[in-house]
Amino acid sequence: MGGYATRRDVIVIGLVGMLLGAVLAAVAVSAPSADAADGEAFLLGKKNVALHITKLVAKNGLIVKSTRGVPLRIEAPAGEPPLMVNSDTWVRNLNADYVDNYESFELRSRSGSCWVEDAPEGLADSYICEMDAAQIPTSGIVHLMGSAEIWTSSPDEVWCYFEWKKGDGAWEEIHASRRELTAQPDYDICATNAVEWTDQEGEWVDYDFRFIIEGLEQVTDVEGTTASWIWVPWGQTYLGS
């Protein structure tokens, strides 16, 4: 029959071709893709790429659980928030490093005080009650309060006020804290309060505070001297009495 194919040969070759095609098709369908592209099924354990907004709706919530490692990691481009929510409801056990760009330790208020039951004998022109110093980390508000009981044998002009010192700087009188009192014979009180602003941004500064009473030439005694200050960062509210 020379080089011609018989009818049987044609049938055999056809069956082989059909079988090979079926095997290749099965391999192509069953072989997993390295990545899932936009519009394809979500693949676990693979990189999934979406060019459009992808929305997942769960009627009863969504739980992300990992038996090893961080269960959820969100990466955002520079300048963009990694997460947005539509509720201001309190989130239980949420632990954050920053609030409004402040670290948690910067949000704690700070305070100091001094109290002297009886000033030393032989006072000259003034008496100083040194309050506790503190490091203040950022911009905020300082509220100061102080008073002293004045004992005098004759009317006398007395002043009380606050001073503060920032870092290695000089002592400065706090704006609008000075109070003048015409102390009456026997007993009177010099009291004052003030509010001042700390305006450094993002740097720690040592602050010292003191309560000063001046004009004590005719004063026989100073008792019950008390003074205090409290600092709160911007965004917090302090209600003082």
Image: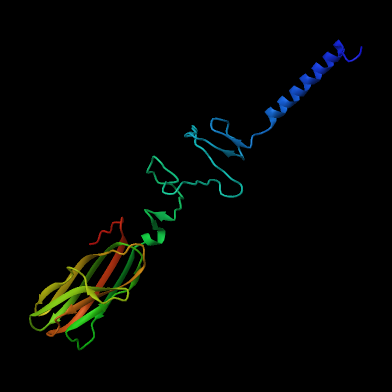
Relative to the observer, which residue lies in front, 167 or 240? 167
Horizontal arrangement in the rendering, residue 25 relative to residue 90 (left or right): right
At which x and y percent is residue 163?
A: 23, 74
Q: Is residue 149 above or below residue 65?
A: below
Say which residue appears at 27% left-offset and 70% top-offset. 228
Outermost residue to the right: 1
Q: Quadrant of the C terminus?
A: bottom left
User: What residue is rendered at 14% in x and 81% in y?
Assistant: 215
Q: Toward the viewer: 215 or 219?
A: 215
Residue at figure coordinates x 24%, y 65% from the top left: 196
Q: Quadrant of residue 191?
A: bottom left
Q: Nearer the viewer, residue 140 or 1?
A: 1
Residue lying farthest to the front in this orientation? 2
Q: Residue furthest left?
A: 155
Query: Is 152 left or right of 169, judged from the image as shown?
Result: left
Residue 32 left/right relative to 234: right
Q: Is residue 15 above or below residue 165?
A: above
Figure quadrant of the N terminus: top right
